[in-house]
Amino acid sequence: MSVVRDLRVLLRLTDFRRLLAVRLLSQSADGVYQVALATYVVFSPEKQTSPAAIASAMAVLLLPYSFIGPFAGVLLDRWQRRQVFLYGNLLRTVLACGTAALMLASAPDWLFYASALSVTAVNRFVLAGLSASLPRVVDEERLVVANSLSPTAGTLAATLGGGLAFGVRLVSSDSDAAVVALGAVLYLCAALASLRMSRELLGPDPEQVQTSLTAALGSTARGLRAGLRHLAERRPAVQALAAMTLVRFCYGAVTVTVFMLCRYAWSSTESKGLALLGLALALSGAGFFAAAVASPWAVGRFGPFGWMALCAGTAAVLVPALGLTFAPAPFLVSAFVLGLTTQGTKIATDTVVQTTVDDAYRGRIFSLYDVLFNVAFVSAAAVAALMLPPDGRSALLIAMVASLYAAITLLLLRQRGEG
């Protein structure tokens, strides 16, 4: 396979291997930490879990990625990136230990969320630094391949970290704190792994750093405004981003529903509910993988807007057919279907944005894309918090999601016809 061959070539590069090790350890720790937070909010015996609590947890996990992102790059281009990986992961080690202590002490929720927010906020610097460092360890000929394989490997590491967290959570007595402690150990390993690279290896070069921080932040804000004006002139990109935002909203609403069903409606014990949630997330992940396999052919066959319309139309039919039963087996099938259709829509949206937006503006547009993607998910959790009963059974919410999918399908078919 070409992917295996390309990865084998890259792994011969010593500095690439060391940078990849930092990514794998950092993102596996992220997966452990995020699952620990989610299960603490949803499955702690001493807590009466509510959709509002889930919405709060999702806000803590997702929003820092979006709002810090554009301005994190300004600071990242002023600091040595190797030091960002070292001190950033050391800081997260300490903060994660603090989160574990708060769990054991049954601290007030606001203090717990403040600690969790601090850990996830640092992550934006680390992930952006990993991407910015790649050109320093890979030659230009292999850069495209490295940009494809390295983030994919990181996502897989985060998934495996989440699976490890579920396993520890099921067998440990002080489970939530133990899982967070595991994440802290992995953050520490990532910090130590960064020491295998020299301070100067990953840049930035001192002569290329803008001298004034105020000027750098100001130029970033002006650049974002220019990016928005450019996007407004690209109607296909605007429509694709709007459709992706709504699809992500629907996926978020169903995700919160599954959390509540696993917690209260489908299981009489915590361990069974946690196992069902893990299975649902695994099937959704399998749907993401299936979308990655199917989308290149589907986009070539139907066009990006045709594939997006097919994804949304499939969800519009299957969400009510499977979801209104509120039974585990149909909902688990829908987890796979929605994973496939959501990721398929995202892949098509990426294609539209990349092909219609000028190269000079793509970074800024994808920063906006990141904001829309995560805010839609958190907004869905907030709406679900208002609509869901304690056991998660809401026919009205399922009907709303199905109606949104149907509306998205019609809008996308119209755009395809105009194109």
Image (spheres, rainbow, N blue to C red):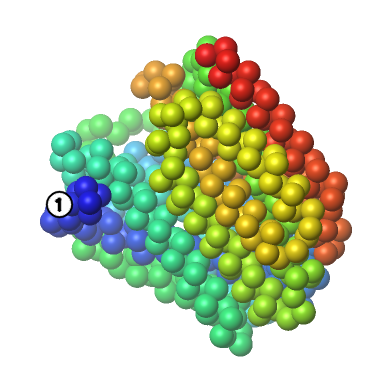
* Image mark count: 1
Residue at left offset 36%, top offset 49%: 151
Give the image location of residue 416, x and y in percent. Answer: 56, 19
Q: Is residue 372 above or below residue 191?
A: above
Residue at left offset 44%, top offset 42%: 294
Give the image location of residue 176, x and y in percent. Answer: 60, 76
Instruction: Identify the element where label 1 is drawn.
Output: helix
Q: Is residue 43 above or below residue 331?
A: below
Label 1 amino acid?
Answer: Val
Give the image location of residue 361, x and y in percent. Answer: 42, 22
Q: Where is residue 61, by image quadrant?
A: bottom right
Residue at left offset 52%, top offset 52%: 287
Q: Is residue 129 above or below residue 181?
A: above
Residue at left offset 18%, top offset 41%: 142
* Left or right: residue 241 compared with residue 213: right
Residue position for label 1: 9
Mark 1 crowdedness (10 Å alpha carbons): few <14, some 14-19, many ≥20: few
Give the image location of residue 73, x and y in percent. Answer: 41, 38
* Left or right: residue 211 compared with residue 124: left
Visible residue check, residue 200: no
Residue toward you, 290 or 354? 290
Q: Is residue 12 above or below residue 170?
A: above
Visible residue check, residue 138: yes
